[in-house]
Image (tube, rainbow, N blue to C red):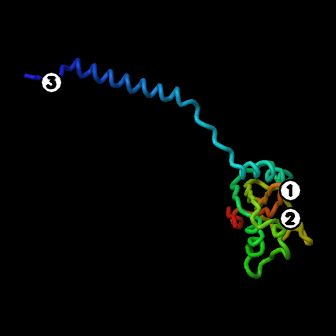
Amino acid sequence: MWSGPSIEGVICRLTLAGAVLIGLASCASTTAGPAPLATPDPNQQACETEGRAALSTYSNILTLAAALPTTAGAVARWEYTRNGPNGPRPAVSRWSAFPAGQKVVLCYFDGDFANFAPSHPNGPLYAMAYERALVIATQGQSPWVDHIGPKATNPLIAP
């Protein structure tokens, strides 16, 4: 003959255990309060305000693709070397005038740059898809539109 607890006793214990779990879960959710707001990324904020404004004449449809922090010294070295040993480069990088450790943000924007027409003495050399722009921003200076071109030749990189 069965000597264990009765079915009614087991059901009662299971119901009581379930009620306790539900009560604890509801207490935990009401005492925890709302989830804390994420702290805005200052690099993204700089790109969204300063970088976006610098490109407003070229496109109305922009998406921030990347906000990559770096330094003025790294950007200056990058300008001197990014096109290879025989590629075009500035005689003097504008970023070499800044302290090497000054914070700089590379703001990459994707969009339709239909209003962009690069200046060339002989007019446009060829039709190109202008779909990515790089704006360099630093505190206390106007943002610098570095270049606008195709995504294929403008990867999302920082020096």
Q: Name the element at disc 1.
A: loop
- Pointer 1 or 3: first along the chain: 3
What's the residue at 83%, 50% (across, down)?
Answer: 53
Disc 2 or disc 1, which is closer to the eye? 1
Mark 1, other Cα within 10 Å: few <14 / some 14–19 / many ≥20:
few
Residues tagged 2 and 1 counted as in contact (Cβ below 8 A): no
Locate residue 12, reporting x and y percent. 28, 19
Quarter of the image where one finds residue 125:
bottom right
Amino acid, disc 1: Ser
Identify the residue position indicated by label 3 in the image: 4
Do tag 3 and tag 2 residues touch (Cβ < 8 Å)?
no
Residue 38 lies in quadrant: top right
Tell which circle, 2 or 1, labels the residue nearer the N-terminal end. 2
Alpha carbon separation for disc pair 2 and 1: 20 Å
- Residue under label 2, please give it: 118
Q: Earlier in the sequence, mark 3 or mark 2?
A: 3
Is 158 on the left-hand or right-hand side of 50?
A: left
Amino acid type for the residue under numbered disc 3: Gly
- The residues tagged by marks 1 and 3 sit, at their Cα atoms, a distance apart of 81 Å
Determine the residue located farthest toward the left in the rendered image: 1
The quarter of the picture where the C terminus appears is bottom right
At mark 2, the secondary structure is loop
Q: Which residue is mark 1?
A: 142
Q: What separation in Å lies between label 3 and label 2 (alpha carbons)?
A: 88 Å
Question: Residue 25 versus residue 122: which sits nearer the camera?
Answer: 25
Left or right relative to 94: residue 151 = left
Q: Position of residue 92 (x, y in %)?
A: 85, 74
> Residue at image x 68%, y 64%?
157
**Callout 2 amino acid:** Pro
